[in-house]
């Protein structure tokens, strides 16, 4: 992998737009859009802006998150993210099982039914996060994690994944300024978070038709413009307005 990615000395930029492939025809269900990335990239903020914008252009939209989005999922979220000080470290494979349990409930209770009824679903984090955190970050076998994912999701894959990319050090610095730190910020070192970032970029490079990699080091407005452009490329001109002067979405890889 490129040394700039390993060291976190800034994103790798591409000269041309890429990273999103519109399917030959729209799905027979709603669109499934996920927003991924290391800590501090602004996933919650951008997911909320995307929901409001899509509603504004007349689309039916549901926004959710991982872990969470259901009663069981929110209980697991509290367990997974807010472990009390001094608690024993959760084994990475146990982490993966718990995240996938929350994921299964979210898919069965919310995502599948909404998609099948024609509603677009926006999810802040999905299965790629488990691959990045428990796989690349903690060193679990990726194929084992993919097997767990396949059971949890019944093979459901996003139509578009927006990766908000930024160096681990910057993302962690942003999170220290907030009150919503989780055990992944407090209990894991910067090396872990660098591996997570590298993992996300590797996943994006291997699936360029699904991923749009957005430079999250920039301002919220600039990030939002790139997010909106990626979604417009997915939806096509018949579904969303096309506005000029958008920043390029980087080609992963």
Image: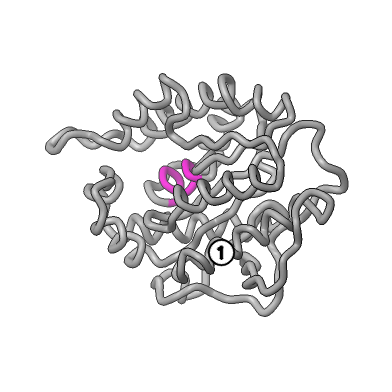
Magenta segment, principal secondary structure? helix
The C terminus: image quadrant? bottom right
Vertically, is 95 above or below 163? Answer: above
Q: Pointer 1: residues within 10 angstroms few (<14), some, or many (20+)?
A: many
Name the residue tied to disc 1: 214
The image quarter containing residue 231 is bottom right
Q: Residue furthest bottom?
A: 15
Vertically, is 28 above or below 243? Answer: above
Residue 36 in the image: state x and y as whole percent: 51, 50
Quick check: 182 left or right of 155?
left
On whether residue 228 falls in the magenta region, the answer is: no
Residue 196 in the image: state x and y as whole percent: 42, 54
Vertically, is 163 above or below 107? Answer: below
Q: Which residues are magenta?
A: 129-136
Q: Nearer the viewer, residue 97 or 60?
A: 60
Q: Residue at x 26, y 53 (%)?
A: 178
Residue 200 in the image: state x and y as whole percent: 51, 55
Q: Residue at x 49, y 62 (%)?
A: 165
Q: Residue at x 67, y 74 (%)?
A: 245
């Amino acid at each position: 992998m490129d040394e700039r990615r390993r060291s976190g000395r800034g994103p790798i930029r591409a000269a041309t737009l890429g990273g999103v492939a519109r399917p030959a025809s729209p799905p027979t269900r709603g669109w499934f859009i996920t927003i991924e990335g290391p800590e501090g990239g602004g996933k919650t903020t951008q997911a909320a802006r995307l929901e409001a914008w899509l509603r504004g252009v007349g689309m039916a939209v549901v926004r959710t998150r991982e872990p969470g989005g259901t009663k069981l999922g929110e209980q697991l979220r509290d367990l997974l993210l807010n472990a009390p000080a001094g608690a024993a470290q959760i084994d990475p494979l146990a982490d993966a099982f718990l995240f996938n349990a929350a994921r299964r409930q979210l898919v069965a209770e919310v995502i599948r039914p909404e998609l099948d009824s024609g509603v677009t679903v926006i999810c802040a984090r999905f299965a790629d996060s488990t691959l990045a955190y428990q796989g690349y970050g903690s060193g679990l076998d990726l194929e084992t994690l993919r097997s767990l994912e396949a059971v949890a999701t019944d093979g459901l894959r996003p139509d578009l994944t927006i990766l908000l990319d930024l160096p681990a050090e910057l993302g962690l610095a942003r999170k220290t300024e907030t009150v919503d730190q989780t055990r992944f910020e407090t209990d894991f070192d910067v090396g872990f978070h660098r591996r997570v970032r590298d993992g996300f970029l590797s996943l994006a490079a291997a699936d360029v038709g699904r991923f749009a990699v957005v430079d999250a080091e920039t301002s919220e407005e600039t990030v939002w413009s790139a997010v909106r452009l990626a979604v417009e490329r997915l939806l096509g001109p018949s579904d969303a307005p096309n506005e000029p002067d958008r920043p390029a979405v980087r080609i992963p890889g």
